[in-house]
Image (tube, rainbow, N blue to C red):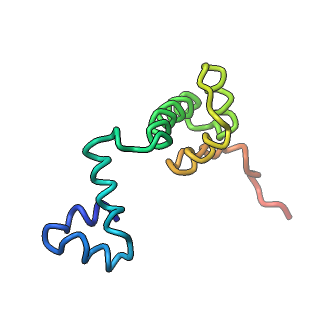
């Protein structure tokens, strides 16, 4: 939604677009301020940005096979102190899902 507002705010204005989309104009202005000055982001958002890079690296090293639990263990082994639930949340948000293995499904239908 923020990208849509950014594209069309010069023609329609921020407030009318936000009224139609039923979001507060302050939401748009907050995202725009953070985009211009990342220091305004919350501590959690800044930490998430660091964590997602490490999660993607650990997930990539496993060629996309590791799920959240194994990624969490790998990060802990590498000395990055992070909660398992945080790894799960960030993997869910950033679509870092383990690839399916060909051996995970039966090769023939059961009678």
Q: In the figure, residue 69 lies in which quadrant?
A: top right
Q: In the figure, residue 40 lies in which quadrant?
A: top left
Q: Is residue 93 left or right of residue 32?
A: right
Query: Relative to 107, does residue 81 appear above or below in the rendering?
Result: above
**Residue 101, horizontal then vertical, whole percent:** 66, 43
Quadrant where the C terminus is found in the figure: bottom right
Residue in view at x 63 percent, y 46 percent:
100
Q: Is residue 84 left or right of residue 24?
A: right
Q: Is residue 104 left or right of residue 62?
A: right
Residue in view at x 57 percent, y 50 percent:
92
Query: Relative to 79, does residue 44 appear above or below in the rendering?
Result: below
Q: Is residue 101 left or right of residue 32?
A: right
56 or 107, which is in the foreground?
A: 56
Query: Relative to 21, does residue 56 appear above or below in the rendering?
Result: above
**Residue 68, horizontal then vertical, whole percent:** 65, 40
**Residue projecting furthest to the bottom:** 20
Quadrant where the N terminus is found in the figure: bottom left
- Give the number of callouts: 0
Residue in view at x 14 percent, y 67 percent:
10
Residue in view at x 63 percent, y 44 percent:
88
Q: In the figure, residue 17 lies in which quadrant?
A: bottom left
């Amino acid at each position: 939604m923020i990208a849509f507002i950014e594209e069309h705010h010069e023609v329609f204005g921020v407030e009318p677009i936000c009224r139609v989309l039923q979001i507060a104009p302050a939401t748009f202005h907050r995202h725009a301020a953070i985009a211009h000055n990342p220091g305004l982001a919350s501590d959690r958002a800044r930490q998430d940005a660091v964590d997602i890079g490490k999660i993607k690296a650990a997930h990539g090293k496993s060629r996309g096979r590791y799920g959240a639990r194994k990624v969490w263990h790998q990060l802990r082994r590498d000395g990055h102190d992070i909660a398992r639930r945080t790894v799960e949340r960030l993997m869910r948000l950033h679509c870092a899902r383990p690839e399916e293995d060909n051996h995970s499904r039966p090769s023939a239908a059961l009678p």
